[in-house]
Amino acid sequence: MKKIIFVAATLMAMASCDIGNKYVVNGEITGAEDSVLYFENMSLTGPVAVDSARLGADGKFAFSDKAGMSPEFYRLRIGDRIINLACDSARDITVKASYATMPTGYTVSGSEDCERIKELSLRQIALHKRVMALENNHDMNREEALDSLMKIIDEHKAYVKTNYIFKDPKAASSYFALFQTLGNFLIFNPRTNRDDIRVFAAVATAWDTYYPEAERGKNLHNIAIEGMKNERIAAADRDKEIDPAKISTAGVIDIKLPDNTGTIHTLTELAGNVVLLDFHIFGMEESPKRILMLRELYNKYHDRGLEIYQVSVDADEHFWKQKTAALPWICVYDKSSLSSRYLSLYNISNLPEFFLIDRNNNLVKRSEQMDDLSLEIERLL
């Protein structure tokens, strides 16, 4: 078995926009003659007007904007009626709607991401209606209502995670899903829910990989890291084992696993070194050849500051211990095997897979972004 492929969606081609190109959003919104239609960019600091048009009797419109290197988000708005859109690889997006049913009854073509965003928007509206119905149900006491509310929200989140976010975390629609709200509250909130940290981290890692210069990706990464920091502080307060003042953030999602002696190793403890983070299965046919390659790199660069942090997801722990007994680098084991949460957090679709991390604990590149691993290590050293 040469490769294990368990997230086929991530093998899709990277969706991006080329610098200097433009895309067009056009279509018609009927029943809105003389209304002003706004085309707004949903920036990290809020909506920014890009263009506007007063609609005629036929409701036709056309807007364009410069495309960047990563997905961007926009909305069409008349008053408080809104249609959310995303620019990814699509050059022409067509929207058709009636003013009366504009937020829910529109059609969009030219972008699969925009279609998924519509599906997510409809699900958000349906969730809001279910919550409102629950609030108006006076046959339940407060405890029963709260329990039902949590079940409704958890059911919604589980569906969105499975069918959108984890299915393709690099997609613009997955990013959009992270910031949907219920009233004034985020449905996925990494500041209060440890499971939601994982969701944000999955998308953040995908954007780190596919859109490394995107401000949105950097913002996501910071949110995920801050969420993990807050969770560690909360755990310290509960367990009284960790001094919160000693908890620091890093530019990489931390890993904490045992080696073959039971000693716990964290990825971030290697700060100050260039780290090759390797996810591996020793039971694979190509494993001996890969281990030989890693030995050569380790022997060549270890004295200059290279460390290898190797995560095994073998199903047989005893077999793993035998294979790692003589390895000179850090090799840890995740007993969850292919269900390891770290595979999701690092958006891994194939095994083996590796990443390079610089001396400041920042994830720099993953395997597919490197033509010459030795040269990349030399640059970081």
Image (spheres, grey):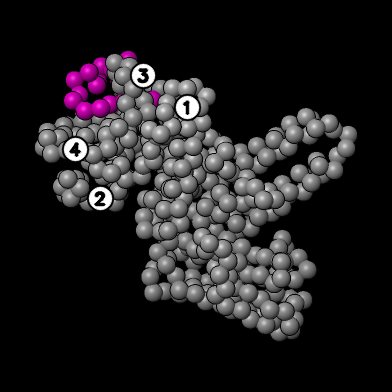
Which mark's residue is nearer the viewer, 3 or 4? 4
Residue 175, placed above or below residue 160: below
Q: Give x and y (percent) for residue 241.
A: 44, 22
Badge 2 is on which residue? 370
Task: Tell me the kind of residue under disc 2.
Answer: Met
Q: Is residue 134 visible?
A: yes
Whether label 1 touches label 4, CB < 8 Å = no
- Earlier in the chain: of badge 1 and badge 2, it is 1
In the rendered image of this protein, does residue 89 appear above or below residue 170?
below
Q: Relative to residue 208, is residue 367 drawn left or right?
A: left
Spatial CA span between label 3 and label 2: 31 Å
Residue 295, percent from left and from top = 16, 32
The mark that comes first in sequence, 1 or 4, is 1
What residue appears at the point 41 percent right and 59 percent down from the top-left corner?
214
Residue 46: quarter of image:
bottom right
CA separation, marks 3 and 1?
33 Å
Q: Secondary structure at mark 1?
A: helix
Which contiguous range is marked in magenta? 318-334
**Residue that label 4 marks:** 306
Q: CA distance from mark 4 to mark 2?
A: 17 Å
Q: Which residue is mark 1?
A: 236
Specify the amino acid type for callout 1.
Ala
* Mark pair 3, 4: CA separation: 29 Å
Q: Position of residue 349 (x, y in %)?
A: 40, 41
Residue annotated with mark 3: 316
Residue at coordinates 25% horizontally, 50% vertically from top-left? 370
Specify which label sits upstream in the sequence, 3 or 1: 1
Look at 32% across and 45% down and name the residue there.
363
